[in-house]
Image (cartoon, grey):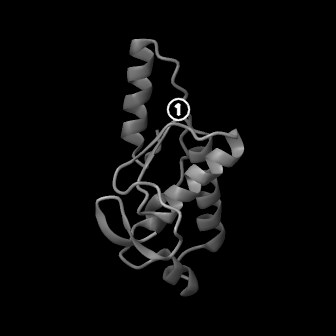
Amino acid sequence: LATDDAAVVAEVEADAARRGHPYRVAHLPLDRAIFDSSLFIEYRLALGYVDGAAVSDATVLDLLLLAHADFFVGGFGSHFSRLALELSVAMKGRVPPYASVDYPYCFHFLEKRPIGPYPPQFC
C-alpha cells in the first residue's frame, strides 16, 4: 500500500491485525506538504521554494518502496509510476502483478500515439 494518508496506514494495520493477515506496512513519516502546490515541483526547486535534498530523498525512497511491493497499482499516465514498475521488474527479474488506474503500460517515450482504445497520449 502506498499512501500519504497516515489514517489509512493506521486503518490497514488495524485491519490486518484484526484479520490475522501477514501484511507488512511500510510508512515514511515524511512531511508531504512540499509536494502540495499547483506549481510543478521542478519550478519550485529552481526558484528555491523547496529543499532539493528533501525532495530527492523522498523521491528515491518512494521509488524503492514501490519497486519492492509484491503488487503494483498505479497510474501509467505518470512517468513516476512507470519508472517504479520498471525498477520492480529489474530488481525482481520478472514482471510483478500490476494494474493501471488510467492507461495501459506503454513504452513509446514522448511520442504521441494511441494507447489501446484511448486517444493519442504522450507516454
Among the 4 quarters of the image, the one containing residue 95: top right
Residue at the image position 45 percent from the left and 66 percent from the top: 35
* Camera-nearest residue between 57 and 104: 104
The residue to which callout 1 is attached is 25
Residue at the image position 46 percent from the left and 38 percent from the top: 1
The spot of residue 17 in percent (x, y) is 45, 17
Q: Is residue 110 left or right of residue 14?
A: right
Residue 100 appears anywhere in the view: yes
Q: Is residue 113 left or right of residue 85?
A: left
> Callout 1: 10 Å neighbours few (<14), some, many (20+)?
few
* Camera-nearest residue between 69 and 40: 69
Q: Is residue 119 left or right of residue 87?
A: left
The spot of residue 69 in percent (x, y) is 57, 38
Residue 16 vertical placement versus 98 (above, below): above
Residue 64 appears anywhere in the view: no
Residue 59 vertical placement versus 9 (above, below): below
The spot of residue 36 in percent (x, y) is 40, 67
